[in-house]
């Protein structure tokens, strides 16, 4: 079992920034990936970004405003979000995947992830 604890959500005005964190604990293997998804009211959960723990390769749904990074020693993944827009308002979830390959297309699929955090709310006002 792997436990994921997210933090860093909140309320911010358009154009502002937030940094989300997600700490993983439990039975963590040496090669894995972690990702961020988000779900707005009435919409499906969508992929935001992912990172391979071994090598640090990253994959984004939309590159530019968001940056995913990791702290290996703390098994923590971050999502730096800049220039936030009202349409970024959603519950943000981190997720853990046993998939450690280099086909990043798999990491945008929810079914590739084995564990999920509880979610953290991000609200961007206009």
Image (cartoon, rainbow, N blue to C red):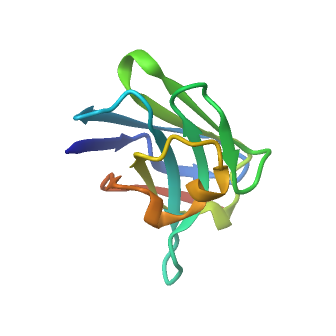
> Could you say which quadrant of the image residue 57 lies in?
top right
Q: Is residue 54 above or below residue 17?
A: above
Q: Position of residue 69 (x, y in %)?
A: 58, 30
Residue closest to the far top: 73
Q: Quadrant of the C terminus?
A: bottom right
Residue at x 52%, y 51% (from the top left corner): 36
- Tell me the residue at 25%/33% (across/down): 25
Q: Residue at x 70, y 57 (%)?
A: 61
- Residue 117 rendering spot, x and y as whole percentages: 33, 52
Figure check: 33 above or below 118 = above
In the picture provided, is 91 more to the left or to the right than 108? left
- The image quadrant that residue 22 belongs to is top left
Residue 10 located left or right of residue 84: left
Q: Disc count in the image?
A: 0
Residue 93: quadrant of the picture: bottom left
- Quadrant (top left/top right/bottom left/bottom right) for the N terminus: top left
């Amino acid at each position: 079992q792997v436990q994921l604890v997210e933090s860093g959500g909140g309320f911010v005005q358009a154009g502002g920034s937030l940094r989300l964190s997600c700490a993983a604990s439990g039975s963590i293997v040496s090669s894995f990936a972690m990702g961020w998804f988000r779900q707005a009211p009435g919409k499906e959960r969508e992929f935001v970004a992912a990172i391979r723990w071994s090598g640090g390769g990253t994959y984004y749904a939309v590159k530019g405003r968001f940056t995913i990074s990791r702290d290996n020693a703390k098994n923590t993944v971050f999502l730096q979000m800049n220039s936030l827009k009202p349409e970024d308002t959603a519950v943000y979830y981190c997720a853990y995947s046993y998939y450690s390959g280099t086909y990043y297309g798999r990491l945008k699929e929810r079914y590739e992830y084995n564990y999920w955090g509880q979610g953290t709310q991000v609200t961007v006002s206009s």
